[in-house]
Amino acid sequence: MYAVAADRQMALEYGTDLRSRIAAAGRDPEAVAIMPGLVTYVGRTHEEARAKQRRLNELLPT
């Protein structure tokens, strides 16, 4: 399972919730790997890439 979270706490909460749902469905929660999904922002400079990230984040519901 690929998952994207805004921060570590959100990732931990998501993992806990997902594993409990997997167990409730009668499956082994440890048999499912939860992998971080990565989003890459590319720019000519670090600042340009961060600016792109900020602009895109403003468009996303949290």
Image (tube, rainbow, N blue to C red):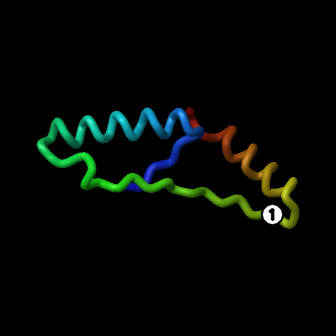
In the rendered view, would you say 3 is above or below 20? below
- Residue at image x 68%, y 47%? 56
- Residue at image x 34%, y 34%? 17
In the rendered view, would you say 56 is above or below 17? below
Q: Provide residue 37's location: percent of width, then percent of height.
A: 51, 56
Q: Is residue 31 left or right of residue 3?
A: left
| Quadrant in which residue 32 is drawn | bottom left
Depth check: 12 or 6 in front? 12
- Residue at image x 43%, y 33%? 13
Mark 1 = which residue? 43
Q: Provide residue 25's location: percent of width, then percent of height.
A: 15, 41
Q: Is residue 2 left or right of residue 20?
A: right
Pointer 1 local density, CA inside 10 Å: few below 14, some 14–19, many at least 20: few
Depth check: 43 or 19 in front? 19
Task: Please identify the residue farthest to the bottom as the structure is shown.
Answer: 44
Depth check: 10 or 60 in front? 10
Q: Is residue 13 left or right of residue 47?
A: left
Q: Provide residue 33's location: percent of width, then percent of height.
A: 35, 56
Residue type of the residue flagged with mark 1: Gly
Q: Secondary structure at mark 1?
A: loop
Depth check: 21 or 42 in front? 21
Quadrant of the rendering where the N terminus is positioned: bottom left
